[in-house]
Image: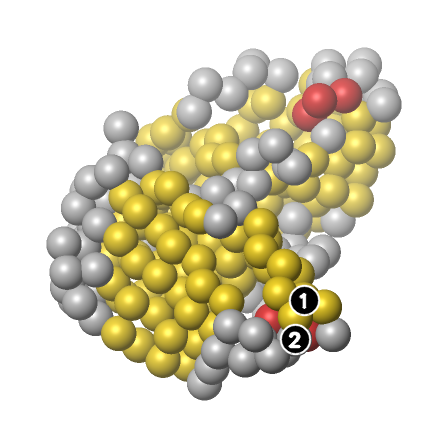
Amino acid sequence: ETGVTQTPRHLVMGMTNKKSLKCEQHLGHNAMYWYKQSAKKPLELMFVYSLEERVENNSVPSRFSPECPNSSHLFLHLHTLQPEDSALYLCASSHRTGAGETQYFGPGTRLLVL
Amino acid sequence: GQQVMQIPQYQHVQEGEDFTTYCNSSTTLSNIQWYKQRPGGHPVFLIQLVKSGEVKKQKRLTFQFGEAKKNSSLHITATQTTDVGTYFCAGQGAQKLVFGQGTRLTINP
């Protein structure tokens, strides 16, 4: 196991629903990431949190709202999603240093928006 | 901004054949990493290359980092069905790690 857990593993939601994805890392890392993986874009970086501060937001629609309450937890709040948002959402963590980082991925949440 | 291109996007081989995927960065990298994602799984770190011209081996997998530290390759000798999956390279730039689009490998047993 990579030490990064995600819940739920599968989620089906309607376009008017509000749901949250949860990620937890047990590796003592200082950075966490949300990626979206779909057939069109294999690995698309959405958000990066370093030391609990958002350091990157790659033009993600406001219907996706991240939250990082501490260095071990990361959430992705979802509301009024579209069918094209159906994808695998992967969380990752790393220990960011000046020399670089290796990212450890969770198992992902497979999301279907109806 | 920093871009990492990976080719081919798909590769289908007969079991026992060799396989190679190539990765090119628009900028010089401090290191390059390779990840493997099995069907239905998540990306898992394989290896990191740091030095110019570095070559590392893991059993049937050979990883190379170019002299200019802008390109890399992964070569699998005599593929086996357990090698199926998508292989991603990731280039470490000054600020962030950027993933390539991945090469999806399928194998005919």
**Circle 2/circle 1 CB separation < 8 Å:** yes
Q: Residue furthest bottom?
A: B59
- A37 in relation to B109, above or below: above
Judge left or right: residue B85 versus residue A104.
right
Which residue is disc 1 drawn over? B107
Q: Is residue B86 left or right of residue A59?
A: right
Quarter of the view holding residue B51: bottom left
**Residue B43 x, y percent position in the rendering:** 55, 57
Q: Name the residue at 51% across, 35% down.
A: A44
The residue indicated by pointer 2 is B15
Query: For the C terminus of chain A, which image quadrant?
Result: top right
* Front residue (pair B87, B13): B13
| Visible residue check, residue A35 | no
Residue A18: x percent and y percent?
75, 22
Q: Position of residue A37 (x, y in %)?
A: 60, 39
Please name whichever residue, B42 or B25, is drawn nearer the observer in this view of the structure: B25
Image height check: is B83 above or below A84? below
Q: Position of residue A1 (x, y in %)?
A: 60, 70
* Residue A22 in the image: above or below residue A46: below
Tell me the subunit letter for badge 1.
Answer: B
The residue sitting at 57% across, 74% down in the picture is: B17
Local secondary structure at mark 2: loop
Tell me which label, 2 or 1, sits earlier in the chain: 2
